[in-house]
Amino acid sequence: MNRSVRMGIDVGGTHTKAVAIDNATHEIIGKASVKTTHDDPRGVAAGVVRSFENCMNENNILPEDVVFVAHSTTQATNALIEGDVATVGVIGMAKGGLEGFLAKRQSRIDDIDLGNNKTIKIVNSFIPLKQLNEAKVEETVGQLQSKGARVLVASMAFGVDDGEPEKIVHQAAEKKNIPTTMASDITKLYGLTRRTRTAAINASILPKMLDTANSTEASVREAGVNVPLMIMRGDGGVMEISEMKKRPVLTMLSGPAASVMGSLMYLRASNGVYFEVGGTTTNIGVIRNGRPAIDYSIVGGHPTYISSLDVRVLGCAGGSMVRADKSGVIDVGPRSAHIAGLDYSVFTDTDKIVGPHVEFFSPKEGDPADYVKVVMEDGSAVTITNSCAANVLGLVQPEHFSYGNVESARKAMQALADYCGTTVEDIAKQIMEKAYAKIEPVILSLAEKYKLEKDQISLVGVGGGAASLIVYFSNKMGVKYSIPENAEVISSIGVALAMVRDVVERIIPSPSKEDIKNLKNEAMNKAIESGATPESIEIHIEIDPQTSKVTAIATGSTEVKTTDLTKEVDADEAREIAAEDMRMTDNSQAELLASSDFFFVFGDKNANGQAGPTRIIDKKGFIKVQVGNGMAVRTTAANYLTEMERLWDEMAVYQTELIARPEYYLCIGARAMDFSATEFDQLVLLTDLEVSSLEPDDEVIVVAANIKQT
């Protein structure tokens, strides 16, 4: 019998790893790893295909078994970092008069500084609409080519409302085989300069990305696999390779995105902070309401309209070296053992640590000269890292990737302890404290930005160095942590199980029901273009009252699953999960507030019917919603607005200058959806789109929640 297999491939800086996952059970049925092929004529595509074929061959997977294949890519990020970009010709367009005068200036952009003395070179031109025709476009394209342009951007003032002029340029350029980006294809937001700049960044990497995409696609077809090839986006979704060829810039940060989506598979909670800990850097980001936090990327100091994960990157990780003086540890990082060409003491044989003494050095020219290395009698040297300290303190377990030789680490650290006149344990604690002091403010600032209440923060550690930081941090912060199984291939798992994701954004002051409906349809169509099946698509709408920006986020899968063998939980098991998450010592304290065929809602008995800790748990045992101050009611589609209005007033928090209104979660059928608005009319608009299709007697669970005021 044929299996249905999902394949995910993650392209890392050092290794390209493939995993095969059973589509029905989500069990891992195969893994393969090869060195990332930076120097191959086909670039990283060669490693993608090699790892893919190895994984199939080693696990007897037939081409016809494969129902999904996707890979993350470092290409877009690397092309921009390394300056491997094409000169961009920008064709601005507008009507005449003042609009044309302003648009000519706003669409004329400077070279884009990428740092590291790398730039995207821009050559500009402008066509007034009354002169726009095929002959004029061809003439303008020829002029831009003579100035070195290899790719084009068509950017029209108010092109988000009327994209036809941009299409005329695109069609003319297509005849000359010149890759072209239409600015309105990248984003539907106003802001001509920012839109044009975002499109120029996209266009600059088109030649590089098209080569890789075509090479990868051809090789996968040669392997006999004919399902669409999907590419990971930087916002955690996937899109078909045909879409990637138009919008490659959306793949920026697809590596960290892959690890987040993998973490979500193992995070049974809806809110959390994820750590991807390598040897040199740690990536930190937030998951809220089951979705990773997304923001616009900044390239070379310029804000763009490229949505990607809101990730903080810190130079403090598993292999970060220690800086010290006589008084003790001064700092940890940012230089890593890898940069200095030194082994971690914890990964060194004990019999090699002979006669150790401390020496101080500068790893790179210009670095402080107080980094620690431990030199032996024979002149060989090792260094002391976060991983060494965590092992010495007994925080790392044998099953963790960063588990090492504790005795070796102790012997090396004894040399530093003697120099500082203290104990090995004290040095280890000082090291962990310095790392904690760097990372804790980042966690708290992200928690504040995304309104994540501290008692709901769950730390999820992925990457090889996770255990060297996360255990100490969770103990210190008093929060839960998990290091998932298969953490070393978590990114590949994330790629294999990722959903198609597409986003449509518009500036719409006072949006009507029709506006929202149109936006939902547009997002659905984009998701279908990116490879999702129509029946699998769910759409989440967000309205920003400050900017009048309305966002429609569509997610869906590439095929509809007919089976799901994950075991369901009953009410008692769900109660246990809720009680543990609410840190209750007695399960009976978790009170069942409401339930449906798909969800259980639990609260705290001590709240006595008032607002209190609330958890929505689905029948698979996943905590879909975690709030510290919520109320729940089970009602019907006919009466849900009455209940929402009651809670709107009952849970209002009156502050000095404003009234903080509750956020809402509606459980409708198998979906738990979140809604927030500053005006009740807006809330009705958003929720009615979901509820209006129900029968009057259909059940709806309403949960209203206030973020605790600090």
Image (cartoon, rainbow, N blue to C red):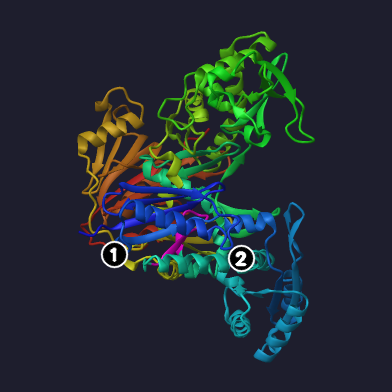
Q: Quadrant of residue 587?
A: top left
Which disc number belongs to residue 208? Answer: 2
- Quadrant containing the N terminus is bottom left
Judged from the image, the secondary structure of the residue bearing numbered disc 1 is loop
Asked whether 556 falls inside the magenta stretch, the response is no
Lateral position of residue 188 relative to residue 557, left or right: right
Q: Residue at x 58, y 15 (%)?
A: 411
Q: Out of 158 and 306, give the one closest to the viewer.
A: 306
Q: Is residue 371 visible?
A: yes
Asked whether 230 falls inside the magenta stretch, the response is yes
Query: From mark 2 to mark 1, how far is it between C-alphas?
Result: 46 Å
Lateral position of residue 421 relative to residue 439, left or right: right
Q: Are marks 2 and 1 in contact (CB under 8 Å)?
A: no
Which disc number belongs to residue 322? Answer: none
Q: Quadrant of residue 189?
A: bottom right
Q: Which residues fall within the magenta stretch?
A: 228-239
Q: Out of 168 and 240, give the one closest to the viewer.
A: 240
Q: Position of residue 664 (x, y in %)?
A: 39, 48
User: What is the residue that sits farthest to the top in this orientation?
Assistant: 421
Judged from the image, the secondary structure of the residue bearing numbered disc 2 is helix
The residue singled out by tag 1 in the image is 693
Q: Residue at x 38, y 55 (%)?
A: 7
Q: Position of residue 13 (x, y in %)?
A: 57, 48
Q: Is residue 684 visible?
A: no
Q: Earlier in the sequence, mark 2 or mark 1?
A: 2
Q: Position of residue 133 (x, y in %)?
A: 66, 90
Q: Amino acid at mark 2?
A: Lys
Q: Position of residue 161 (x, y in %)?
A: 57, 75
